Image (cartoon, rainbow, N blue to C red):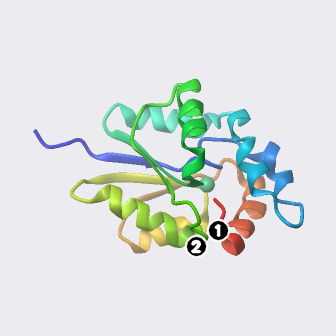
Amino acid sequence: MAPRSLAVFDLDGTLADVRHRLRFLERRPRDWDGFFGASLEDPPLAEGVALALRHAETSEIAYVTGRPERCRHSTLTWLRRHGLPSGRLLMRRAGDRRPARVAKPELLRRLAAGRTVAVVVDDDLQVCAAYRRAGFHVVHAGWMAEARAVLEEAQEREGGT
Ligand SMILES: [Mg+2]
């Protein structure tokens, strides 16, 4: 039997509401440790969670996030706590400061090797554009729009998430 297709979800701004911790990025210098440290408290984004559960009926769920590896334990705890499907979690390597639009397509290509990716869902427009250029079918997560500008600017300049 062929393996099921993959439906791939981003975390920050797609499944997890990061707005309560954007204050850590509005400081100078930006406090990335504070930003990631508070992620366990993120409220889930209902639209994203519903989409993941719907895709889980037909696809295997996986997660590609710009969060660094040191957040793996708290991220898995958060996914379980909010009833999200288990699946592979690909994260940014320690010390990787490249923009998300560069780092995340590389993670997705690694995940996709030999598999069919039915859809990838992300809130970052530049990441979505890079995924499309790499040939993936993309759904843009527009449901946390207010937070996107601050986050994207930080991602682009400092490659933190
Ligand atoms: Mg995101």
The extreme left residue here reads 1
Q: Where, by quadrant of the figure, is residue 29 drawn?
A: bottom right
Q: Quadrant of ligand 1?
A: bottom right
* Amino acid of disc 1: Gly
Q: Between disc 1 and disc 2, whose residue precedes? A: 2
Q: Name the spot of residue 148 as percent of width and height, x first.
A: 72, 58
Q: Name the spot of residue 25 as percent of width and height, x first.
A: 81, 59
Within 10 Å of disc 1 (Cα), the crowding (few <14, some 14-19, many 20+) is: many
Q: Marks 2 and 1: in contact by CB < 8 Å?
A: yes
Q: Which residue is more in the foreground, 97 or 13?
A: 97
Q: Which residue is mark 2?
A: 98
Give how far apart the Cα atoms at labels 1 and 2 are.
5 Å
Whether residue 59 is situated above or below residue 95 in the rendered picture: above
Quarter of the C terminus within the rendering: bottom right
Q: Residue at x 58, y 47 (%)?
A: 11
Indicate left or right for 107 with 59 as reference.
right
Q: What secondary structure is found at the residue carrying circle 1?
A: loop
Q: Where, by quadrant of the figure, is residue 61 drawn?
A: top left
Q: Residue at x 58, y 27 (%)?
A: 82
Quarter of the N terminus within the rendering: top left
Q: What secondary structure is found at the residue carrying circle 2?
A: loop
Whether residue 128 is situated above or below residue 13 in the rendered picture: below
Q: Which residue is mark 1?
A: 159
Q: Name the spot of residue 154 as percent of width and height, x first.
A: 74, 67
The extreme right residue here reads 27
Q: Residue at x 13, y 43 (%)?
A: 2
Indicate left or right for 26 with 39 as reference.
right
* Amino acid of disc 2: Arg
